[in-house]
Image (tube, rainbow, N blue to C red):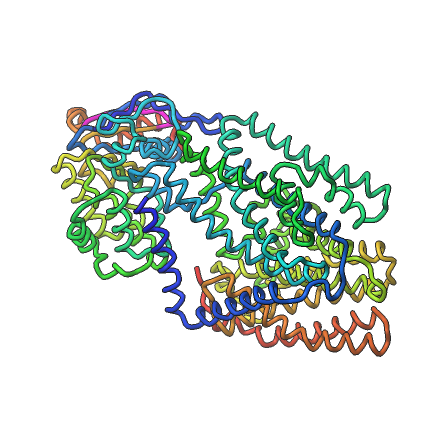
């Protein structure tokens, strides 16, 4: 579903992402782990079509910047940014219009209820707390029923109930055959859900491991993470 | 495109609706609206050239100079940060949606037209002043606004093209900056050479900026030529300017719309900058936003309790100043006040009050700038609320640095002006003290406004309330100074009367606002 080949990105002579390649298949939850400044957000933003890059990114076998690819993926940014003067419901309506969705209202209502936002439908974007904005952001991405979805540090600012709900959303997306890519530096937050882990450090993927492979090694994800990010003295977190 | 039009429509309607939810804010907006309507009506209805009729060449010169400065500053910033019509909400939601980048650019452009309204309003505020000094033609106001519209539509398009060319490499960015700075330096040099020959600021301005080359200079000259037709029948320069700008705006829009665009990355950086600037504005930090901060300054913090606030503020001032306490704000107040006096033509009777005119204009600037100063930033943070000291002490020490800064700026401005206009030392001293006292009046008026109204969500509305409040307070001082000048015919007593009133006012306002920390709420 998502194919990233030799992705490189340079900012002002700083190599933020260096020859990164990986795939996320339908029904698979991949986690992009790494210390601060490892290149996770740059990778996610490149996939979302927000940055120019070297290499190739295919979503559903089409170029990630094409309209067809955009129809297929959802994106939850690290920092939620809503339209200040749009209500929660109008955000969902905008997304439904932009993605040409039909009969979206019921799904929208269900999502809002699930994230305890059903009583905030008429609140403006500027009237919401950061956590609530994050919930709206998540609802907008889920509304399009994506084939591939990217979460950039999704747990930050969420209350425990929403975190629990989000974790079950990850699993439901997986069961529905959606390819899920989660970027985070908090290992505990994704411990129970991941199928594949991609550990980044200094712009490179230093480890690409499936859950089975880790189980065979008999080591914890945290230990492996610290090992591969610290062993070369590259840990920044 | 329907989805994007939905966005624009809802944003606009909800913005209006939300104003109705807060009566105080609504009253403020109605007041501002009436004020603007009054200005618009006055702009069109008032007779022109009643007070005096200055030569059209000077008007053309001023217009050319204004648009040269506007284009230079906006496009230079465009090279640095790109121009963005967008907000982060657009980046996160619209850019990732299955919509063509060209459509999104068109949406941004439509939004920018809304921003044009702001520039038009600003222009309206200047029209009565211009009409008083120049003989406007019946179509004058319309062509002036046309020039403003042409500028606000053209510069983001040009900015975006320049940015997409310069963002490819640092060398290109450096080259573009050099071209811009070189051109600016050339204009300044030409002006200075002419000034050395004429020794007349106004004459030189007409010579340099009212030159035929300036009239037909692409974009800047064209925009200036449109505006220049306000005081004359439309001539060839106007027609060339209007046609040129129409071609530039439509041509660039079409070019950008048809191009295979990949501008999201450029816009992303620019939008982050815009977002940070807006945040700074909301927090009242727009005057200090983007300022370079020096880390290695001599001396550390001193004082205990509330005094530590003073020491901290002084340290912040020194860190962001170019020399001693001289920062961007000082330079703007000093240069604009002296320029104001130079541009305003000398008239019999007014020449004797040069220092008063500089003082009046500098106070106007101070009022505008201080509204976005250090004090308003202080109350956005929790520390001042937490310090274990009395409200009186905290207010005194938190504001003391502003008075020191105003003393420094005032001393610099009025010593320079005094030398320039050959004024007496007592007059210079009276100006310096008046400047400091008025600075205190504006500051404590803001504190009192805050104490009375609490935190008004809109920074613009807050500034407006404060300006009206300050103006009403200053009126008795103006009356006093008029009486003083009629009685003595002396600029010193005129300024002295104003200064004395400001001192009384500052002390009174301080007494009334001193208890502020006992009842206001922290916003953080």
* A80 or A103: nearer the viewer: A103
Viewed as shown, does residue B236 lie left or right of B6? Answer: right
Is residue A233 visible from the viewing direction of this image?
Answer: no
Is residue B98 visible from the viewing direction of this image?
Answer: yes
Work out whether B453 lies above or below B435: below
Name the quadrant of the N terminus of chain B: top left
Residue A194 image offset from top left, x and y in percent: 19, 34
Work out whether B518 lies above or below A191: below
Please report the residue visible at 53 percent of the width from the left and 67 percent of the height from the top.
B37
Q: Which residues are magenta?
A: A201-210
Q: Main secondary structure of the magenta part?
A: strand
* B218 or A130: nearer the viewer: B218
Please report the residue visible at 40 percent of the width from the left and 26 percent of the height from the top.
A9
* B52 or A205: nearer the viewer: B52
Name the quadrant of the C terminus of chain B: bottom left
Q: Is residue A207 magenta?
A: yes
Q: Farthest residue toward the left?
A: A175
Please report the residue visible at 73 percent of the width from the left and 77 percent of the height from the top.
B479
Q: Is residue B222 magenta?
A: no
Residue A129 in which image quadrant = bottom left
* A109 or B52: nearer the viewer: B52
Viewed as shown, does residue B468 lie left or right of A150? Answer: right
Residue B442 in which image quadrant = bottom right
Q: How many marks?
A: 0
Viewed as shown, does residue B479 lie left or right of A20? Answer: right
Work out whether A54 lies above or below A98: above
Residue B202 image offset from top left, x and y in percent: 79, 50
Residue B26 image offset from top left, x and y in percent: 44, 69
Residue A191 image offset from top left, x and y in percent: 21, 38
């Amino acid at each position: 579903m998502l194919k990233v080949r030799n992705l490189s990105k340079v900012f002002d002579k700083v190599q933020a992402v260096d020859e990164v390649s990986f795939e996320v298949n339908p029904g698979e939850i991949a986690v992009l782990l790494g210390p601060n400044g490892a290149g996770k957000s740059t990778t996610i933003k490149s996939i979302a079509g927000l940055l120019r890059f070297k290499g190739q990114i295919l979503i559903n076998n089409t170029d990630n910047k094409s309209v067809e690819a955009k129809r297929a993926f959802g994106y939850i940014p690290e920092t939620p940014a809503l339209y200040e003067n749009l209500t929660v419901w109008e955000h969902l309506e905008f997304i439904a219009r932009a993605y040409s969705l039909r009969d979206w209202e019921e799904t929208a209502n269900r999502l809002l209820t699930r994230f305890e936002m059903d009583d905030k439908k008429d609140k403006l974007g500027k009237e919401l707390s950061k956590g609530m904005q994050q919930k709206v952001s998540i609802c907008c991405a889920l509304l399009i029923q994506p084939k591939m979805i990217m979460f950039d540090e999704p747990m930050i600012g969420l209350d425990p109930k929403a975190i629990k709900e989000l974790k079950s959303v990850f699993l439901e997306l997986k069961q529905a055959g959606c390819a899920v890519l989660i970027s985070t530096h908090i290992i505990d937050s994704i411990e129970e859900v991941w199928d594949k882990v991609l550990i980044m450090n200094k712009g490179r993927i230093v480890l690409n491991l499936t859950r089975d492979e880790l189980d065979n090694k008999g080591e914890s994800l945290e230990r492996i993470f610290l090992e591969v990010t610290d062993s070369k003295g590259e840990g920044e977190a | 495109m329907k989805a994007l039009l939905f966005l624009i429509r809802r944003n606009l309607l909800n913005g209006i609706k939300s104003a109705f939810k807060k009566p105080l804010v609504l009253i403020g907006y109605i007041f501002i609206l009436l004020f603007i309507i009054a200005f618009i009506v006055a702009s069109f209805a008032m007779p022109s050239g009643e007070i005096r009729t200055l030569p059209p060449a000077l008007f053309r010169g001023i217009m050319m100079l204004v648009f040269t400065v506007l284009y230079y500053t906006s496009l230079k910033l465009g090279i640095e940060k790109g121009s963005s019509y967008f907000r982060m909400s657009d980046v996160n939601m619209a850019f990732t949606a299955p919509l063509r980048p060209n459509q999104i650019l068109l949406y941004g452009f439509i939004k920018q037209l809304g921003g044009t309204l702001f520039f038009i309003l600003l222009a309206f505020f200047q029209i009565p002043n211009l009409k008083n000094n120049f003989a406007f033609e019946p179509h004058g106001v319309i062509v002036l606004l046309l020039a403003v519209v042409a500028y606000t539509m053209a510069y983001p398009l040009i900015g975006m093209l320049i940015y997409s060319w310069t963002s490819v490499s640092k060398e290109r960015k450096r080259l573009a900056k050099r071209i811009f700075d070189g051109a600016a330096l050339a204009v300044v040099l030409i002006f200075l050479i002419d000034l050395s020959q004429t020794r007349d600021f106004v004459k030189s301005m007409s010579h340099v900026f009212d030159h035929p080359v300036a009239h037909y200079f692409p974009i800047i000259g064209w925009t200036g030529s449109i505006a220049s037709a306000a005081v004359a029948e439309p001539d060839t320069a106007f027609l060339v300017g209007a046609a040129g700008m129409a071609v530039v705006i439509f041509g660039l829009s079409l070019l950008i719309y048809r191009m295979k665009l990949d501008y999201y990355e450029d816009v992303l950086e620019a939008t982050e900058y815009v977002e940070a600037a807006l945040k700074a504005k909301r927090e009242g930090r727009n005057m200090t936003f983007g300022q370079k901060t020096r880390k290695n300054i001599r001396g550390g913090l001193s004082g205990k309790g509330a005094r530590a606030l003073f020491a901290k503020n002084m340290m912040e001032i020194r860190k962001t100043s170019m020399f001693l306490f001289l920062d961007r704000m000082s330079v703007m107040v000093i240069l604009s006040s002296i320029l104001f006096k130079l541009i305003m033509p000398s008239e019999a009777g007014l020449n004797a009050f040069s220092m008063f005119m500089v003082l009046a204009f500098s106070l106007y600037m101070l009022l505008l700038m201080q509204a976005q100063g250090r004090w308003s930033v202080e109350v956005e943070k929790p520390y001042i609320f937490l310090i274990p000291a009395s409200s009186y002490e905290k207010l005194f020490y938190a504001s003391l640095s502003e008075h020191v800064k105003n003393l420094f700026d005032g001393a610099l401005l009025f010593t320079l002006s005094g030398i320039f206009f050959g004024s007496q030392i007592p007059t210079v001293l009276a100006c310096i003290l008046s400047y400091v006292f008025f600075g205190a009046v504006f500051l404590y008026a803001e504190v009192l406004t805050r104490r009375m109204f609490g935190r008004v969500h809109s920074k613009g509305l807050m500034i407006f309330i404060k300006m009206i409040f300050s103006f009403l307070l200053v009126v008795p001082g103006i009356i006093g100074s008029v009486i003083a000048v009629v009685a003595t015919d002396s600029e010193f007593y005129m300024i002295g009367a104003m200064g004395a009133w400001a001192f009384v006012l500052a002390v009174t306002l301080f007494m009334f606002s001193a208890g502020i920390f006992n009842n206001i709420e922290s916003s953080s």
